[in-house]
Amino acid sequence: MINEKHITALAHQSAVNKAVDYIENHICEKIELDCMAKVANLSKFHFLRVFKTLIGETPLQFIMRLRLEKIASSLLSKPSDSITSIANEFGFTDITAFSKNFKLQFGETATKWRQNNSQLNPEDVSSQTITNKSLEHYVNNSESEFVEPNSITNKSIEVKEIKQISVVYYRHYGSYIRTDQLHEKMWAKLFAWADLNGCLRNPDLKTLIVYHDDPNLTSADKQRMSFCISVPENLKIDSKIGKMTIESGKYIVANFELRPQEFILAWDWVMKWLPNSGYEPDSRYCFEMYSENTNPELFNIGIYIPIRV
């Protein structure tokens, strides 16, 4: 039997997840404390305490860090855009304040950071040059064999228009390091909820994982990963699970057939291909979607990157 303390903890986690989703969906706008607290259905003062306890940062610190990380990523993925225009896009109208905060977070100016972290050229991408260090973001090497960088092949890459997808999710706060224990636990928990609530009868059921942060920019303890299944838009949910929307629009979709330890190679392949593709990403969610595979040792996945039109 679930005790009252556990019920309160679930309600608090649900409230914070709603606030975090609201922040992410409005990251380019001015975000007021009153609005966040209202979304979380908590008083302002209670919301501040609960948010800091569960996230480890105040809402203001979280918003500032998230904006700066998105700017740092955009500096590389949008090489033709000026630093000022990118900063303005994410709500920094005072370039002096932006410069001060960026240097405080990354230890160098935005100009220097862009120069020092420029993407590889197309020849590097085609050879799929992946560093051992990058593997550490997703693969627990104590549990997984080393994967040679040229061992994966991109099956296809295309631009697709997708319709809005409503999903329910369980969110993992912490390292993206991929372990069988974590993924099995999260999927089992999600499908158990879906089965109890009649969500598995949908013939067009979609399963996906949203990676909210760039592991090259966000420390492991602050990374967020949402395990999702698609549900009807009007489905009512309880406090045990979160609900969010994958926005409609155009996406780059790169399709792969992978072993679990190869996922990071596929993501790195896409991220190195993107800057020279002629497409620019926008601020919607990046995610991977799964489809059936007759080989139980392999996953058919599509990596979805939202793009500007």
Image (cartoon, rainbow, N blue to C red):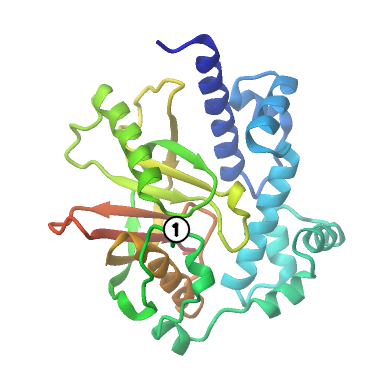
Among the 4 quarters of the image, the one containing residue 57: top right
Is residue 42 toward the left or the right of residue 303 in the image? Answer: right
How many numbered marks are there? 1
The x, y position of residue 59, in whole percent, is 71, 37
The x, y position of residue 129, in whole percent, is 45, 81
Is residue 176 toward the left or the right of residue 153 in the image? Answer: right
The x, y position of residue 215, in whole percent, is 56, 59
- Tell me the kind of residue under disc 1: Asn
Residue nearer the viewer, 200 or 22 = 200
Name, please, the residue furthest toward the bottom: 123
Residue nearer the viewer, 38 or 8 = 8
Is residue 51 toward the left or the right of residue 195 in the image? Answer: right
The x, y position of residue 130, in whole percent, is 46, 77
Q: Residue at x 46, y 63 (%)?
A: 307
Establish if 126 lies above or below 201: below
Among the 4 quarters of the image, the one containing residue 206: top left
Quarter of the picture containing the N terminus is: top left
The residue singled out by tag 1 in the image is 140
Among the 4 quarters of the image, the one containing residue 262: bottom left
Q: Residue at x 75, y 67 (%)?
A: 84
Q: Residue at x 34, y 58 (%)?
A: 161
Q: Would you call the spot at circle 1 few (<14 residues within 10 Å), some (14-19), or many (20 or more)?
A: some
Establish if 70 lies above or below 50: below
Establish if 268 lies above or below 198: below
Establish if 153 lies above or below 184: below
> What is the secondary structure assignment of the residue under circle 1?
loop
Q: Residue at x 72, y 52 (%)?
A: 91
Name, please, the residue furthest toward the left: 294
